[in-house]
Amino acid sequence: MSISTHEDLETRNGGGKKRKIGAEDAESKISSGEITSSCSKEVKSKGVYYPSYMGCRSVNNFETMNRIEEGMYGVVFRARDLHTGQCVALKKLKMEREREGFPITSLREINCLLKCRHENIVHVKEVVVGDNMNKIFIVMEYIEHDLKSLMESMRKPFSLDQTKTLLMQLLKGVAHLHDNWIIHRDIKTSNLLLNHRGILKIADFGLAREYGSPLAPYTPVVVTLWYRSPELLLGIKEYSYPVDIWSVGCVFAELVIWKALFRGSSEADQIKNIFQVAIRKKCRNSVPPPIKYGLGHQLFRSYPFPKTLLTYDPNQRISASDALNHDFFTEPPLPCPPSLFPTWPTKHEREARHNRDNASPQAPQGGKNFEDPTEDEEFFQRKINESANNMGFTMSATGRGFVQTIPNSLHNR
């Protein structure tokens, strides 16, 4: 699939002179057969012809169901394909600030996702367009959960065998990326999706990019702060796959101790949190076990594997493929099959249930569901008199109220 910039779309033959392809050009191309009949109606209705998007369907082929989340580079919706009925994730790219064509971050995201087809990487189905060049959407498979929101809703952490399964799937996806010379640069629990079959998938490739050998300088301001490696925090610009491995180690620790391992409020604070632990424990190579986190401490002490992911020196940090062959995954408890994972309500279902449970009671319907006893005047008056007599009252002579009845025994006194 070829994606062109605005300049490419508007520049045609004629000495480099720019001109816009309009409705007249579209009509001539339709009549000459350059545009197929299946596309002619859409071209005529829009009045503008964009050749590089000829293979893309319209976003009108999808019905938006609800909004899932919004990130730096786009807004994601849950939608339904009107032709197949399939539920998909529809990511609208943020194009409002783009003045020179297609955003490079989105171009990298699409290219990386199309290049890396893997069971543990979210699958891109197609790119669809709206009525103009500022409305471009990526259609991806819909995954029910992201790990962060799922963990926030769970009453107890994943078991160790489940944690091993999640970590193994994450490492398989990361290994596939690195084998294709791609670094994700934003691995965190909110970018890891989990479906009802227990399959984990890596998502959100907005910061991903290809790298080569020798390494080229890249921006160090990547990866969400709590998952950022020491070399990035120190400002190094020539880096590669070890930055992803550090993030994997932080995710692993979070799955075990149920909170982020290093929760810095700034880059300086994050560096302090990481190295202060090392100084206190006299650890030169890797992060020591977090002693104040019960199960986490036991896990880090029992298994050397987490330390291999969180090694300070990026040159000594283990690779994803080597990590998959570590004894950690062959020692009991063994990773459980993904099919044995429990199922949880989706985020949309949880929000709907929460709104329903916390909704205010409905306002009264004006009493229309109740019979009005005043409609039978005689029956109503008779019931009032009976009740008054039982309590020792009788209707007054004027008929405007009740007077208390005095027993004869009291008159004789």
Image (tube, rainbow, N blue to C red):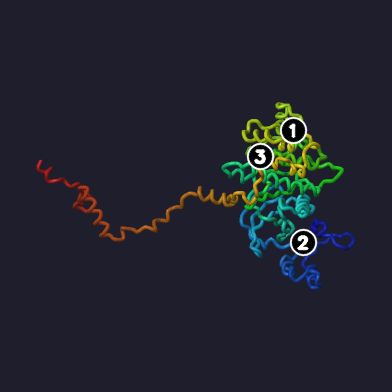
Q: Which residue is mark 3?
A: 254
Where does the N terminus fall, quadrant-wise?
Answer: bottom right
State how far apart marks 3 and 1 are (Cα): 17 Å
Furthest residue to the bottom?
Answer: 31
Return the residue nearer the eye: 158 or 121: 158
343 versus 31 height, above or below: above
Q: Position of residue 345 (x, y in %)?
A: 58, 51
Disc 3 crowd rating (10 Å Cα; few below 14, some 14-19, many 20+) is many
Q: Is residue 263 visible?
A: no
Where does the C terminus fall, quadrant-wise?
Answer: top left
- Mark 1 secondary-structure assignment: loop
Return the residue nearer the eye: 185 or 45: 185
Looking at the rendered structure, which numbered label has been put on residue 286? Answer: 1
State how far apart marks 2 and 1 are (Cα): 50 Å
N-terminal-most mark, 2 or 1: 2
- Residue 375 occupies quadrant: bottom left
Q: As shown in the figure, which amino acid type bears the numbered disc 3?
A: Glu
Q: Which residue is mark 2?
A: 53
Q: Position of residue 251 (x, y in %)?
A: 68, 41
Return the residue nearer the eye: 210 or 20: 210
- Mark 3 secondary-structure assignment: helix
**Camera-side mark, 3 or 2:** 3
